[in-house]
Image (cartoon, rainbow, N blue to C red):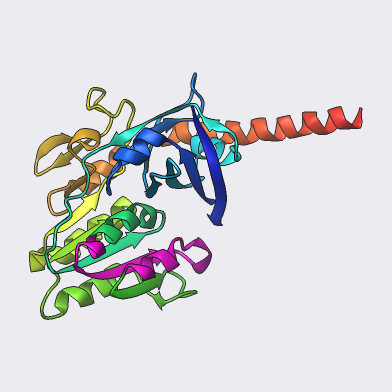
């Protein structure tokens, strides 16, 4: 059991939790993640990046968007409640080295996964150019934190409500056109965003790393649920990743696999809301009686 020590809604339907997890906090490195389960009997297992860790407090920080049943159940938990099942740190940590100029591109909730990596890259002595994108201002997360670890910070929103009205690939293209060119690009966000970031850097042959958030179950490479195609070969995100060469990832296959259970996910989400309404009605009737 992992008790929740802190909870905050940092954007619309986006939540930050600090969870008591001493061993994970002690061992975690940038780029790694946990797999958790809210319902220990019937619940699915979902991966979440470890955004930060406090060894003194023995806590790890998780950020997630409530979009489906499991993340809504997680958002329902309050300080003092516990996450019944959580394992980690999982995955290979990011290879952090001093390479020169690194462009870090984050989109939507992917900014949460990007933050610990960009922070480590900056602390390693690299010049860090950060590009952050969101659909609108009220969906931006970690802006202050990302600015604090960036030598150059570029903000984009789809609707122009903050920063530039542009997709993240536009300033990325501009960065690639500079001389000297970036030495590395790291892109984390929705698969379609990472796909087009990789296509933007491909003509320049700039090494581009992406972090894949595939469907996971056991986190040990045995179930095969998180398999992806990289360079024509089958790889497992949980043990071979989560980071891969963006120029080799078959993003179309990844997106197809992510949508394979969409109908079941939507039905579970609808049932969650129906149960919530029924439960709320029953509570009101009990109080009235």
Q: Can the viewer see residue 134?
A: no
At 70% from the left and 35% from the top, the residue drawn is: 277
Residue 147 covered by magenta stretch: yes
In the displayed structure image, the side of residue 223 where residue 21 appears, left or right = right
Q: Position of residue 152 (x, y in %)?
A: 29, 76
Task: Examine the image and state in which quarter residue 108 appears.
Answer: bottom left
Return the x and y of residue 66 as percentages of the image width and height.
Answer: 51, 45
Q: Quadrant of the C terminus?
A: top right
Residue 177 location, quadrant: bottom left
> Given the current orientation, which residue lies at the most extreme bottom position?
179
Classify 146 as above or below 228. below
Q: Residue at x 53, y 38 (%)?
A: 4
Q: Where is residue 26? Give x, y as percent.
A: 33, 39
Report the side of 56 relative to 138 (left or right): left
Q: Which residues make up the magenta segment?
A: 121-149
Of residues 93 and 178, the one nearer the viewer is 93
* Residue 40 in view, yes or no: yes
Q: Looking at the image, which residue sits at the far right?
A: 289
Residue 116's spot in the image, x, y percent? 32, 54
Does the magenta segment cover residue 151? no
* Vertical position of residue 41 compared to residue 19: above or below: above
Work out whether residue 23 or residue 109 is closer to the camera in this orientation and state it: 23
Of all residues, the one furthest to the front in this rendering is 56
């Amino acid at each position: 059991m992992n008790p929740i020590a802190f909870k905050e809604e940092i954007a619309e339907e986006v939540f930050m939790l600090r969870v008591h997890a001493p061993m994970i906090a002690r061992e975690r490195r940038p780029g790694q993640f946990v797999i958790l389960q809210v319902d220990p009997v019937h619940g699915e297992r979902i991966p979440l990046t470890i955004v930060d860790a406090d060894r003194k407090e023995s806590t790890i920080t998780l950020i997630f968007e409530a979009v489906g049943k499991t993340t809504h159940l997680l958002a329902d938990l309050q300080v003092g409640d516990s996450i019944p099942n959580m394992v980690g740190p999982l995955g290979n940590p990011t290879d952090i080295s001093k390479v020169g100029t690194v462009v870090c591109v984050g989109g939507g909730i992917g900014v949460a996964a990007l933050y610990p990596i960009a922070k480590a890259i900056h602390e390693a002595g690299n010049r860090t150019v950060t590009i952050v994108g969101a659909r609108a201002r009220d969906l931006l997360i970690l802006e202050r934190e990302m600015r604090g670890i960036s030598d150059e910070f570029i903000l984009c929103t789809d609707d122009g409500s903050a920063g530039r009205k542009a997709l993240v690939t536009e300033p990325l293209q501009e960065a690639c056109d500079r001389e000297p060119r970036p030495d590395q690009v790291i892109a984390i966000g929705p698969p379609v965003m990472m796909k087009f970031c990789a296509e933007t850097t491909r003509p320049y042959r700039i090494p581009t790393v992406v972090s894949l958030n595939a469907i996971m179950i056991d986190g040990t490479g045995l179930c095969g649920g998180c398999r992806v195609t990289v360079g024509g070969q089958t790889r497992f995100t949980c043990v071979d990743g989560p980071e891969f060469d963006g120029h080799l990832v078959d993003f179309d296959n990844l997106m197809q696999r992510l949508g394979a259970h969409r109908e079941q996910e939507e039905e579970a989400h609808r049932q969650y809301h129906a149960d919530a309404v029924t439960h709320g009605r029953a509570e009101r009737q009990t109080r009235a009686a």
